[in-house]
Image: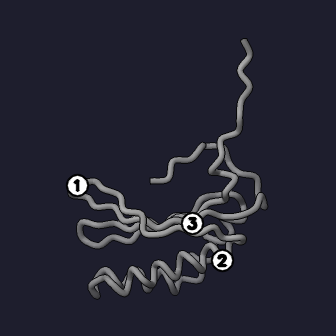
Amino acid sequence: MLRLPRAEAPPGTGHYWCEVSAHTTGDHREHRLGSYHAPTPRLAMKWLHGRAGHIADQLDPGPRTPVHAWLNDTTEHEYALATLAAGGIYTHTIRDGTTRYQLAALPTARLFIPRTQVTP
């Protein structure tokens, strides 16, 4: 699971970290399925779309339908791009029985906690 500082990253601060993981509800385990360091929000979303397509290919027809709907939702895609460009985090969850797949992208500036100086 991504654990990040709460401070917002300033817009346009660089690259984007993308990650896909599977979470099983029965034993509460997390399995990392892949990650990618994207230079732009558009490439981050392209990578997430590719991973979602791979997940959809392995799902039964029922759970596959919402994934295909998300892949073709241009309004959601534009929202994700705007969110990333503004320094926010974008996530999407795919559910299949006892497993949920988490797709996430965030600016790399959000991965680092600023140093604070301790005064004696």
The reply to whether callout 1 and callout 2 are in contact (CB within 8 Å) is: no
Q: How crowded is mark 2: few (under 14 residues within 10 Å), some or many (20 or more)?
A: some
Residue 75 visible within the image: no
Residue occupying the point 60% across, 80% down: 46
Left or right? Give the position of 106 relative to 59.
right
> In the picture, residue 100 is in which quadrant?
bottom left
Q: Residue furthest top?
A: 120
Q: Position of residue 89 (x, y in %)?
A: 59, 59
Q: Is mark 3 on a helix, strand or loop?
A: strand
Q: Disc 3 marks which residue?
A: 18
Lower sequence index among marks 3 and 2: 3
Q: In this view, does 39 lie above or below 6?
A: below
Lower sequence index among marks 1 and 2: 1
> In the picture, residue 87 is in which quadrant?
bottom right
Q: Any mark on residue 27, and which?
A: 1
Left or right? Give the position of 85 relative to 36.
right
Name the amino acid type tagged 3.
Cys
Q: What element carries label 1?
A: loop
Q: Residues within 10 Å of mark 3 (few under 14, many from 20)?
A: many
Q: Disc 2 marks which residue?
A: 43
Q: Position of residue 32 (x, y in %)?
A: 42, 63
Name the amino acid type tagged 1.
Asp
Q: What element carries label 2?
A: helix
- Quadrant containing the C terminus is top right
Left or right? Give the position of 110 relative to 98.
right
> In the picture, residue 68 is in which quadrant?
bottom left
Q: What distance separates the C-alpha of mark 3 from that of mark 2? A: 10 Å
